[in-house]
Amino acid sequence: MDDEIRIPVSLPLDSDGFLRRECPTCEREFKWFSHDEGDANAEPATQYFCPLCGEPSGLDSWWTPAQLEYGYGSAGDTIDQVIKDSMADVFKGMKGFTYKPNPSFSLDIETPDPLTEPDDMVMVEPPCHSNEPLKVPEEATRHIFCLVCGTAFSA
Ligand SMILES: [Zn+2]
Ligand SMILES: [Zn+2]
């Protein structure tokens, strides 16, 4: 068995295809454009710059608290199934013992309500990387940093 359990979590995008993000440094929210997998227009990066404070962080450090909570919650059913399967495996090899899986077994991890993404914030395009548009709160549009290279610009 593969030790790694992958849990698909689909996060909602707004109607323009933007994903909500939270900066781990300034803890403010913005949105970046969610490119389709394999999109040649997507800028390859090993880190992103916060459009609001300009601090760089690794690609995986931009989850909002709601997204993290949703991710853990979505994992609940998968974890239940993995435990059920491995219990069945343990008992399979025992002679004279019949293991009856308990269909109601559950760790009772609460399944969260689906997230929704409102169409808020203002869309801006960094002049240096116009293929990576952003959405930022309206009051932040005068001083924005490019997600990819950190260059400051104003919209
Ligand atoms: Zn920031
Ligand atoms: Zn740039």
Image (cartoon, grey):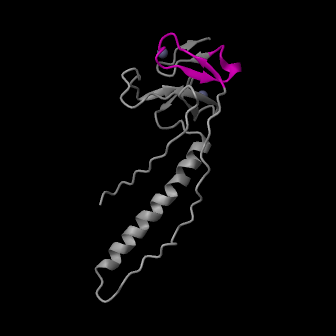
Quadrant hosting residue 41: top left
- The image quadrant where one finds the C terminus is top right
Count numbered badges in the picture.
0
Does residue 129 show up magenta in the picture? yes
The extreme right residue here reads: 139
Please provide percent x and percent y for residue 52: 61, 23
Please report the residue visible at 47 percent of the width from the left and 76 percent of the height from the top.
102
Please report the residue visible at 63 percent of the width from the left and 15 percent of the height from the top.
143
Please provide percent x and percent y for residue 116: 62, 39
Please report the residue visible at 43 percent of the width from the left and 76 percent of the height from the top.
101
Please report the residue visible at 59 percent of the width from the left and 39 percent of the height from the top.
64
Which residue is nearer to you in this view: 149 or 37?
37
The residue range painted magenta reads 121-143
Quadrant hosting ligand 1: top right
Please provide percent x and percent y for residue 1: 29, 61
Does residue 70 show up magenta in the picture? no
